[in-house]
Image (spheres, helix red, strand yellow):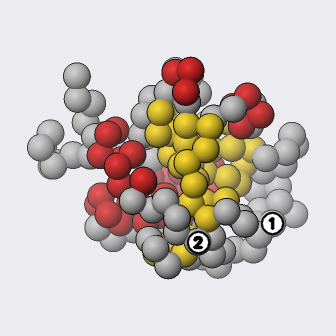
Amino acid sequence: MSTAATRPTPAGLVCAARGWLGTPYVHQAAKRGAGCDCLGLIRGLWREIYGAEPEVVPGYTMDWSEPQGEEALWQAALRHLQPKPVEPAYRGDVILFRMRQGAVAKHIALQSETGPMSRFIHAYSGHGVVESALSQPWQRRIVARFSFPDVYEVT
């Protein structure tokens, strides 16, 4: 069992994610500095925090799960992360987005700041890993929030 001293903190998660800033966007990749996609960013953070990834990720296409309408990313998040209410937002939350109404949720990111200057870190096609404002258009796309297991809230 982990102790408070070894468990990740929200600030530690954000610091780790900021270490990925500038990583190029590479579909299906998950290597800091070399390339990743949005899932690869979260997978890479998991490896940095816990070691090995919790499951092997099967190959997927850019439109993965859409033709079948399967919420594959959401189901994987439910298997390994702790579900949270969509509100309130906390630093270190893993955010799941539905990019179009009626489409499957297939973008994932880490909340880096909350409040009036809310921000999130994500890997975005054509941009790589960036920290973006969590603007109203992005906020409207949030469908779920999660936390990494055993996150230690420092008060």
Mark 2: which secondary structure?
A: loop
Question: In the rendered image of this protein, does residue 88 appear above or below residue 39?
Answer: above
Query: Which label is found at residue 63?
Result: 1
The amino acid type, in three-letter code, at marker 1 is Asp
Quadrant of image for the C terminus: top left
Residue 94: image x %, image y %?
A: 50, 43
Q: Residue at x 75, y 44 (%)?
A: 98
Instruction: Of the two numbered discs 1 and 2 on the same chain, state the one appearing first in sequence.
Output: 2
* Residue 54 visible at all: no
User: Which of these two is toward me, 91 or 71?
Assistant: 91
The label shown at residue 24 is: 2
Mark linked to residue 114:
none
Q: Secondary structure at mark 1?
A: loop
* Residue 52 horizontal/vertical position (percent): 33, 70
Q: Nearer the viewer, residue 17 or 85?
A: 17
Give the total of numbered labels. Answer: 2
Residues at marks 1 and 2, CA–CA distance in whole angstroms: 20 Å
Callout 2 amino acid: Pro
Tell me, yes or no, if residue 16 can be seen here: yes
- How packed is label 2: few (under 14 Cα within 10 Å), some, or many (20 or more)? many
Give x and y (percent) for residue 42: 49, 58
- Depth-wise, is mark 1 or mark 2 nearer the camera? 2
